[in-house]
Image (cartoon, coloured by chain):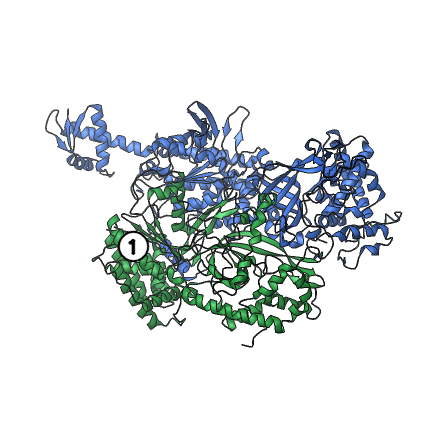
Chain colours: A green, B blue
Amino acid sequence: MGGPPYDCLANPLGAVRLTFEKAIGSGTQTHPSAFDGKDWGALDVFRHFLFQESGLSQVPILNPKTMRWVRPYTLVRYRGMIQDMLGNEIYAGAYKDGYLWRTNKFMDISQYPMGSSPDMCVWERRLLYCVPVPGQSSWTEPSCEMNLNQGMDQSSQNRGKRRRMDDEDDPMDVVHDDEVKSSPTTKKMREDGFPFSSPESRDSKTGSSCTSMATFQYVDKDYLPCLVKIYDSPESELKLNDVVEFIGVLSFDSELALEKDDELSNNFYDDALVYLPPNKVPRLHCIIHRKLAVHDFLQGFPIMEPKPHLVKEIREALFRHLTAVLGNDGVAAHFMLLHLLSKVHARAFDVFVGKLSLNLIGLSKESVSVFGIRLSQAVKNLLPFTHCIPLTLEYLNTASLAPKRDYQTNRLIRGVLQLPEGSHLMVDETQLESGTLNSKGIENTKLLKNLVEFQKVEYDFQYCKMEMAADVQLLIFSEGKSNIVPADVVIPFQPSSLGSSEIPVAEAVEAWRWYLATVQSLPYSIGSEMQKEVEDDLVAARQADRSLGSQDFNRWMTMARLVSTSFGETSLSMEHWQMVKELERLRMERLK
Amino acid sequence: MASDSSPVNFNNGPSSPQDSSSSPIPNTSSPAHRRRGGRRQTSTPSSAAATPPPNPSRFAKSSSTPTPSRSTRRGRRPATSPTPTAAATPSSTDDFPPPSSDGGEDMEEATPTFVWGTNISVQDVKNAIQMFIKHFRETQELSNDIYGEGKYTRLIHRVLEIEGEWIDVDAQDVFSYDSDLYNKMVRYPLEVLAIFDIVLMDIVSLINPLFDKHVQVRIHNLKSATSMRNLNPSDIEKMVSLKGMVIRCSSIIPEIREAVFRCIVCGYHSDPVVVDRGRITEPTTCSKPDCLAKNSMTLVHNRCRFADKQIVRLQETPDEIPEGGTPHTVSLLMHDKLVDAGKPGDRVEVTGIYRAMSVRVGPTQRTVKSLFKTYIDCLHIKKTDKSRMMAEDPMEVDNGSQSQRIEDDVQLDEDKVEELKELSKQPDIYERLTRSLAPNIWELDDVKKGLLCQLFGGNALKLPSGASFRGDINILLVGDPGTSKSQLLQYIHKLSPRGIYTSGRGSSAVGLTAYVTKDPETGETVLESGALVLSDRGICCIDEFDKMSDNARSMLHEVMEQQTVSIAKAGIIASLNARTSVLACANPSGSRYNPRLSVIDNIHLPPTLLSRFDLIYLILDKADEQTDRHLAKHIVSLHFEDTEIAEQDVLDLATLTAYVSYARKNIHPKLSDEAAEELTRGYVDMRKRGNFPGSSKKVITATPRQIESLIRLSEALARIRFSEWVEMRDVTEAFRLLEVAMQQSATDHSTGTIDMDLITTGVSASERMRRENVLSATRNIIMEKVQLGGPSVRLLELLDELKKQSSGNEIHLHDLRNAVSTLASEGFVVLHGDSVKRI
């Protein structure tokens, strides 16, 4: 490997430093204030490494498992949902150490003493508090085994290489050798590659396992939040509840934990950060980030053109699977398929195009224990983010569904309904018994109703409430039509058999996941002739039955879209329109 | 030059946060400073802007960064170097242009002193401030008397009289007098304000040499307010103005400003030690020459000076939050009198200096984290909602904290007002607003116009005699299911200030009005407001009005006419204001509206309540293919064109809201003479219509309630046009609106005329007449056909007979049944199921 003279993976800060020095040194561009915190070429290096040299797969994903062996100041990636935004942070971006400019970008603690220098550029970065995506299905997580081995190999390999490099051809280090050696801390860093790392980590270098993160305390074994610091990205790019992959430098400094002594300043400022001690929440200095779509979670299934015949095949298989899960109830399976494909395409003041929440009625406590569980497993297996709410009286009265800002800690407390786009939410109403709702219960039912009707969740900021747009597929199980969560489609569930609990082949499931993700985002249109047909049909239907309203029409149109796209087609055909009408007829028959 | 337009060089100068703690003032060593310095030190150490110690500032010195030692060294240099160029040390190349406007007057000063790191001459600034205080006149003063005292001279006198501690200076005044001074002040607030304070003290000591309180200057009302979101490193050390809401206040922190030590060996008290960069150095030795004991000094708390300090968190206003973001917060540092000026929940406008301080990794470590913590050193705080509370107009749009949708304290700036006024001048504004109201619902234009009137509202009137007339317009929508009544309601709820949305099914009387509870902690009885009280000065939307319990509905009688809610329970007797417009919607009692029955029969509402609605609209689902097609077309296009739904030429919700609130707040139309005349004439006309020539039957087509409604409607219509006078056309339109609404609901279907009896009593005049006819006919038939004590007759037989006799009118079984039951009550017949027996 020829490559650049630095290792992006094990020593990303070295790469940052090199590019910085290059940019400073090159031509007239000598004053770092001209950067104003913007990128000076480091991003290109990383982009090149990650995407051209396919280094992305070598970057370990941060999770509770990898946390044990990942070393600080290496390149890692973190996949999570932006749960809260903690505002901006101002830091000393560039400063003069003697006669040389240094940068603090992508790090918490300056590597060189900078206290006495008046020459300094002040830049800002954004703080995002990210959590693992709520309800993330297990299949979305890459198999850890592979990653672990790979990561280990890589790091030890790089380690050796890096040291060699330092000695031989890292000109920067040679130049400043004298200064660096003057301070014991920086000396350690020099040898180690990691500034301020604890003594254990030095020892571990010889051992087989790294314990540099040994001081990391797990609050929850499976739950690893992360504080991400964003540098080069406009504010509008990352939004609350986005699911994003951040690639950047992991930083972990035990010293930061000592901050607590300074009580006055804590009381004063970053309240939020005090409650996120670095030994519980790792810091990630994000270099590159990308929003994740379902496709990014699919492993092993090649990305390909949605060819009609292929799509139809997969659709058939998936439909059979759903029918089997639903105890041979074909109509319900049809609706289930459409429901799984639904997604909010457009929002107007009171119309939400594309949502199709489903209410399976006729389920009792007993049948839910059979079909509900099986269905939830099936859905979990198909969709990346799924959630289940047991709608009992106690739950309604006690659960906090809406996210709420806690001004004591100055953070947004996550509510159950803070979900990323494209989440699936199952509400089991069969366990609901009669009783009294308290004020919280009423609030919660209102939230659920708003979510299903308007795809909006009201976040409680105490002094004001803010509506946040959501895009959540809702599936409701109930005995009769649910009034708490009034769904778009209510269908009596009529299983004819107990259904099989066979486990589908892994490859087939992979294909279904790909299918659901791909078909959902197909473009769609209605030809002018078809428009006319549909309009005539709607008018005729309304003439025949005055009780039909815009809501029904909206549902039909949504279904038409979903049926068409479920066959991989981008425009509505007569056949599919007829199918919608037939499905509705069958449903109506059942409702009678 | 705007304060934020020029890039600031952070390598030097006071803008670097590193030096934030070191006020550059020490280098401003003009003789005047020295002279006063000593006195000030003892009297007002909290604001010793010009005291000799290295770090005098009235601002918090919380930074714990070791100050670069050069700052003091460099700082002194300008004083000793005779030329201005000396100030510009090699590294302090600043891009601020030399002051041009006021540079010529201080030539007599031999050694100009400069604000460190810049080429702003202290003397220049001083002169400029003196000029400003002495010579600033407000525009109206300018014309009146040019020789009188200026605004600020008067202010200073007043402050001296009341022994105040500060003077509010309007930054706009500074700008209009000397824009250069304003720019300097915004860019170098620490320095300029310190000079400002000095100048002020000079003036004060001239007026009253014995006045020993320190008077500070407080700047407010900057030209441009910064959004909290846009605060960035280039704003550091600059004066900024922010709007936001106080969300948290710390307790009051006593901050030491001056410490006195005592020697425990000899009891000698040291001179006061002033805080230096947040620290006080304890003297290591006693300074008394004959003691000199080591490590003997202890702090004497009683003789130290403390100042109040408070940390407040401010959150940005909801309208500044972009989609998909969470509100930002910023810390404010309050001192002295500003402490407790804002409570959590207050909306405030803050003027202050944006500052940053570096964070040490640990208290013992020398390493500095590369982070800075930012805060705003508060100079001035203004509660933005105060003025609203003092306004007394009852129709004023005023927003409580519970209504988050419309922030009407987002003070409409002038541009916006101009825009709205421009909008109001358009000839088709009425139609345009109608179109903009719930653009997703078609047709129903007249209903929308009515709703528009409700949004704008009429003028409330309170006579000296105590009688009051409401200005709120109440509307009832009755109609078939699926005619988007609820959507209209939702829309109005979204749009209206303080709208409350309830459903009749879930509302109880107490939930709507008010109820008394026992506070769980104190055990006191507490009055809790219900929906109607909460929507005081707003619109209370009640869905499914017909499903409301009678008990709850009866509470509405008072609310809708008297506009109060009276409570008499659990020892609390109170009358609460509920100046609410009610917008209700109801479904017909059958699933569908029966056009043959009256409104009363259709919705089962008591006529007493019904008559309190100004407008009653029937929204009927006519089996009209045209409308259906329109609907179908719209829905198809909605699903086909994914993104663009918005119709053109329609005002967006925000503009509409702004328009409505502006009109409600600022426009109070009065009736013009011709409009009044027209009203009278029209009303008389309406009354006349009930009298058919040659007919004794009296139909009431209008009641006094209608004329009140008409006045309200015409006032609202004038408001829509931003007109201060109700004109003829408003009245005409009001009549039309009322007629349309009444025609739908109060039309007697048998005669086709408007009959207010329908609303007020539930039975139309012609219906009453017809019933009389049926009754007498039935009586006749029974008299003829049925024998006393004889066999009973079936009702159907009677019906046939009746039909035979009265060939013209159609008679239904239920008419007959009504008639027979009347007869039964007279004791004329007995009704058993279907058979009638005469007794």
Residue closer to the observer: B780 or B706: B706
Q: Position of residue A76 (x, y in %)?
A: 50, 63
**Quadrant occupied by the N terminus of chain B:** bottom right
**Mark 1 burial class by Cα count in 10 Å: few <14, some 14-19, many 20+:** few
Estimate the x, y position of residue B339 in percent, counting from the top left: 63, 36
Foreground of the two, A53 or A73: A73
Q: Position of residue B497 (x, y in %)?
A: 50, 41
Residue B743, image x, y percentages = 39, 40
Who is closer to the viewer here, B113 or A1? Answer: A1
Residue where numbered disc 1 is placed: A373
Residue type at mark 1?
Ile
Q: Is residue B551 above or below residue B373?
A: above
Q: Is residue B429 visible?
A: no
Q: Is residue B41 visible?
A: yes
| Residue in view at x 23 percent, y 28 percent | B822
Which image quarter is the C terminus of chain B in? top left
